[in-house]
Amino acid sequence: MEFKTFVFYLLSTILVLAALRVVTARNPVHAALYLVLAFFNAGGVWLLLSAEFLAITLVMVYVGAVMVLFLFVVMMLDIDFDRLREGFWRYLPMGALVGALLVAEMTLVLGGRYFGLDAMPEPAAKAVDYSNTKELGRVLYTDYVYPFELAAFVLLVAMVAAVSLTLRRRRAGRYIAPEEQVAVRHETRVTLVKMAVEKEPAGDEAAGVEAEKAGGQ
Amino acid sequence: MNFVAPELYPATAEILVALMALALMLATAFARTLAYALAQITLAAAAFATLLTLGADVNHTFSGTFVHDLLGSLLKLAVYLAMAIALLYGRAWLAARRLDRPEYYLLAILMTLGMMVMIDANHLLTLYIGLEMMSLSLYALVAFDRDAARSTEAGMKYFVLGALASGLLLYGMSMVYGATGALELPVIARAVSNQSASEPVLLLGLVFLVAGVSFKLGVAPFHMWVPDVYQGAPTAVTLILATAPKLAALALAVRLLPGGLSALAAHWQTMLMLAAAASLILGNLAALAQHNIKRMLAYSGISHMGFMLLGLLSGVVEGKNGLAIDAYGGALFYAIAYVLMSLAAFGMVILLSRAGFEAENIEDFKGLNRRSPWFAVLMLFVMFSMAGVPFFIGFFAKFAVLQSVVAAGHYWLAALAVVMSVIGAFYYLRVVKLMYFDDPVDNAPLQAPAGVQVILSLNGLAIAALGLAPEVLLALCAQAMRTSVITG
């Protein structure tokens, strides 16, 4: 076995095992850490495919940023994970059956027959000074500039959606609104209401009886 | 490494809407009440830009990721119209519930941009990004009434199922890319038709693509989200959800299936046939049992989308696409007709609602004739048109589609569609019966603003008028399909 093949099998085995532990781990922090391990190994597999930029981005963005954020959320939110995992064993047979079917079907189609080296020959090796990063950057800002700009808009949508669904002004907070204070005029502070003189209604018998009772005692 | 700056002219409308969305966001930070006016101005300006760049020729730009053609222009104009009317109908409804925050209009405009990108996509990547932009905005809009458990639950359901469907679609796209080595739709079409791609891989991808498209259209067996989301979403959002996105989903289907994979037509036509038959049966039968008008219209929407698929699946017969123009043109006509009817139907639900009261039950339409004879007549138009009673637009839509189904030789499917339409007529006519022959439960006068009443009247009249003269629109739909799908 070539050394590269050995590395591939090593990385893939750890990747699959780590992914399995993500779903089966009882402690959510452990699950998140296994996900980090899975990402790291996936990055390694990409490195074997000489996609070094993607590999490093995966480690930096997913492991470095997304998963750390995720760990924070998991540790800070008080989620009852045992309750979330209720029914795991009940749904396991069905889920396992669907999963096994998916894997079987994918191996049939994605196996060596259609994606093997004779169907898709290995691309010619690039020159030593070939830079994957530079090439990606070039197409990203030229051929794919339209989808690239649109992806920025998708992120904007996500941001607007998140803010509009979660931002709440605190009712209890004692805010000062300077623009209202400045705009105050003396007419609006006190309103004088003119009204007719009110007399005690004469025919209020109930009140009269009450008053008599009070007087008699 | 020579780079030619892309031609921006064909994408004028998209660039305009994108810039206006940013302007709207900045402007409403200072003046929150401007949002509605700016959104309408954006839609009007986009319509103007689209009309200005209208042409029969097909232009590609942005290195083949973008296509400008008659089909795209027609669909975009329909989308602007649907969005403008939906925003107009929804405005007073939202204000009465204190939901008229500027983010609503901003998300609506960003959603419009997403739909435009989808409609003008010539590349799997742009197709997917447009779809995500539209869907993400819609998820947020469905959950917009964030203090109502029903709305957030609907948003959550829609988000989880929608994300799964997007995943399926993306998986299918990756299979197609794996088999053909191309993301650009015309290149994929060429690779598939000269059989340089391995068929089993393509077919696996195709199954996932059809599943994703079916979800976005809301046809059985991927319809589970439709009734719950329609019912749970604020009615103004249901109005948006039931109209313009259907046009964008049709664009997705047309660009992907007849546009990119026409050589595999025999396979995807069979899949769509099953989906159409299932939607017709399920949509019409389930609608019979509904008491909530939003749910009833949701199931009716499932059956209508199934009907529209009948057009898409009868274009290619035994490898020849001689009937394709009429069939796809019929499907496009059906979609536009459905959007017009759906706008009016949900518009009526909004018209009958007022602050603190939702006209959600079919019973709320009782005795509408005595409360407002004019709007009872309009609702009668809408219901008759949806049922397919002759000389309304819905009849000609069904007729055009059925004609191509029969021409393609799928007699059992045509028979099923007719039988199901007759069953479906029952629940549409039940609403008419309640309006004319029952006593009103609630005698409050209609409170919608004059603008809504005028546009709703025009909307209802358009359903009748287009039914009397459908030829122009039908010819336009066929012409759009001729220039875009058959030669492109």
Image (tube, coloured by chain):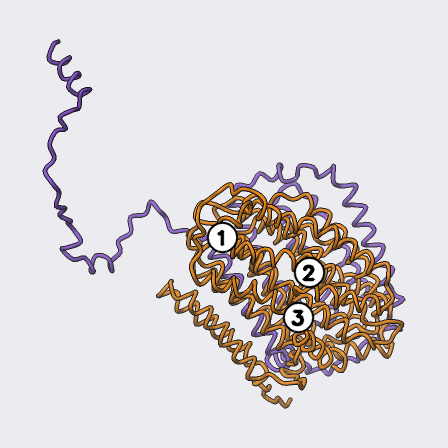
Q: Chain B takes which shade in the image?
A: orange
Q: Is the residue under label 3 in contact with that under label 1 (CB below 8 Å)? A: no
Mark 3 residue element: helix
On the image, numbered disc 2 is attached to which residue? B217
Three-letter code, disc 3: Leu
* Residue B140 image point, x, y percent: 54, 56
Camera-near label (1 vs 2) is: 1
Of B142 and B458, nearer the camera is B458
Q: Chain A takes which shade in the image?
A: purple
- In which quadrant will I find the N terminus of chain A? bottom right
Three-letter code, disc 1: Ser
On the image, numbered disc 1 is attached to which residue? B372
Which chain letter matches label 3?
Answer: B
Q: CA distance from mark 2 to mark 3?
A: 15 Å
Which numbered dot is residue B127? 3
User: Hey, which quadrant is residue B80 in on the image?
Assistant: bottom right
* Residue B393 image point, x, y percent: 66, 65
Mark 2 residue element: helix
